[in-house]
């Protein structure tokens, strides 16, 4: 089993920045993709950014040039640097880890990000 714990969410003003962290523990697969999703009230969960085990990354169009996903060298912690935040970025942000070989997926409990003046 893999446990994921997100942190860093809080209230921030429009135009501000936040850095979210996701710490993985447990039986972490050697090849894994990590991603950030978000879910706003009344909306479905959506992909924000993904970091593949190969090192490549992908982003949703609405966060390109504003958000950056990164991982530490051991690939057990993922980060999401969020700049130029907008009120529509308000959501619960979830960390996701996928075992590349077994296709098992794991989720964290989420961290609330609120962008408001």
Image: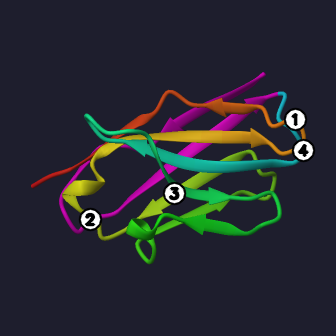
- Say if 105 sits above or below 71 in the image: above
The front one of 92 and 41 is 41
- Say if 66 sits above or below 52 in the image: below
x and y, in percent, of residue 67 in the image = 45, 67
The residue mark sitting in front, 4 or 2, is: 4
Give how far apart the Cα atoms at labels 2 and 1 are.
39 Å
- Say if 46 sits above or below 44 in the image: below
Report which residue position mark 2 lands on: 16
Q: Which residues are magenta?
A: 1-26
Q: Residue at x 33, y 63 (%)?
A: 17
Q: Which mark is residue 102?
A: 1
Q: Secondary structure at mark 3?
A: strand
Asked which quadrant contains residue 112, the reply is top left
x and y, in percent, of residue 101 in the image = 90, 42
Give how far apart the Cα atoms at labels 4 and 2 are.
35 Å
Badge 1: few (under 14), some or many (20 or more) residues near its Cα, within 10 Å?
A: few
Is 88 situated left or right of 66 in this image?
Answer: left
The residue mark sitting in front, 1 or 3, is: 1
Q: Residue at x 41, y 36 (%)?
A: 111
Q: Residue at x 87, y 48 (%)?
A: 31
Q: Secondary structure at mark 2?
A: loop
Report which residue position mark 4 lands on: 30
Disc with the residue nearer the chain's start (3 vs 2): 2
């Amino acid at each position: 089993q893999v446990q994921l714990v997100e942190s860093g969410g809080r209230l921030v003003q429009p135009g501000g920045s936040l850095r979210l962290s996701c710490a993985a523990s447990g039986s972490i697969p050697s090849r894994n993709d990590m991603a950030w999703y978000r879910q706003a009230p009344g909306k479905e969960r959506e992909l924000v950014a993904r970091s593949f085990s190969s090192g490549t990354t992908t982003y949703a169009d609405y966060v390109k040039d504003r958000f950056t996903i990164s991982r530490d060298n051991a690939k057990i912690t993922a980060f999401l640097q969020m700049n130029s935040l907008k009120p529509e970025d308000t959501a619960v942000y979830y960390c996701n880890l996928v075992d590349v070989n077994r296709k098992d997926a794991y989720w964290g409990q989420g961290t609330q990000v609120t962008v408001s003046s």
